[in-house]
Amino acid sequence: MQNNKIYHYIMLIASMCLSVAVSNSAYAQQLSYPDGQTLVIQNDGPVHSAQFNYSLRDDLAVGVFSEFVDGPDSVFVGGQITYLLKRVVGDKSQFNAIVSGGAGHISGPVDGASGFIQISGDYASRRMFTSYAIRSRFTEGAETALRQTARFGVSPFLAKSKKIQPFVAIQVDRFDGPNDRWRATPFVRLIKGGAVAEFGVNTDGGVMANLVFLF
């Protein structure tokens, strides 16, 4: 398992190096403009992940995804595809409905094929954002895991152009599967250009630290 840890952290470091070598212009997660790329690095308590996505079109992206989980010391590596079902753009707001899925290999206490499918929707303006996602994880030889995530955040003020835009927010998760439970995570979101940073602490005592880059 030590080799799995080393492999995963090498991937994270390589992803971070890519992120400082590019310039950012706008925020996105898996999807951006055609030929755009996004890098997402996430730390969610015991779960650490990195993904890199390339947008073939403004409604379709492909990417690679790696996830390491402390405790059981499991590593997942695979590919993913993201498709924009619907986008509604207002004067100063935007709504997106997205479906994504991926497949790969997991190693650890359970070793074999693994995959996931997720449906999500989000709405955002300069003063607030909200989203909901439901994600099902299928792993050979293990119970199917379902996670639902709802988020809501508001900005205390509108920042000037090219300045950091802050938000205070909360994320609520419901986990169904091997360990049924609820969890809440108050967090702060900071946006500047094509970079987004999120930091918080959840009710389990775990640290949230997320970085998103578009280039």
Image (cartoon, grey):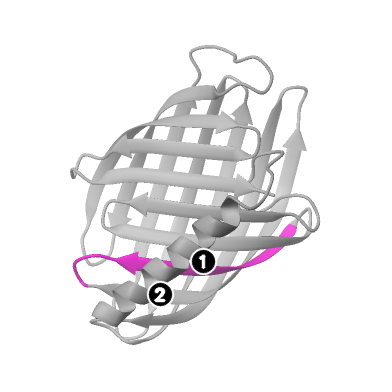
Q: Residue 51, relative to residue 181: is it above or below?
A: below
Task: Report the residue marked by disc 1.
Answer: 117
Residue 68 sits in quarter: bottom left
Task: Give the distance between the C-alpha atoms of the residues marked 2 and 1, in whole angstroms.
Answer: 15 Å
Q: Where 15 falls versus 126 (above or below)?
A: below
Q: How many marks?
A: 2
The label number, if any, that marks residue 126 in the structure image: none
Q: Which quadrant is the N terminus positioned in?
A: bottom left
- Residue at screen point 30% across, 73% down: 5
Left or right: 163, with 152 as reference point: right
Is 210 displayed left or right of 125 in the figure?
left
Q: In the displayed image of the protein, which residue is found farthest to the top?
A: 157
User: Mark 2 is on which residue type?
Assistant: Phe
Q: Are marks 2 and 1 in contact (CB under 8 Å)?
A: no
Rendered view: 193 above or below 106: above
Q: Nearer the viewer, residue 148 or 163?
A: 163
The answer to whether residue 153 is left or right of residue 45 is right
Label 2 neighbour load within 10 Å: few <14, some 14-19, many 20+: many
On the image, the x and y values in percent for residue 79 come to: 57, 74
Q: Nearer the viewer, residue 131 or 209?
A: 209
Indicate whether residue 33 is drawn in magenta: no
Identify the magenta region: 60-72
Question: Secondary structure under badge 1?
Answer: strand
Asked which secondary structure carries label 2, the reply is strand
- Please give the residue where the numbered disc 2 appears in the rendered image: 76
Magenta stretch containing residue 61, yes or no? yes
Mark found first going from the N terminus, 2 or 1: 2
Amino acid marked by disc 1:
Ile
The x, y position of residue 32, in whole percent, is 72, 50
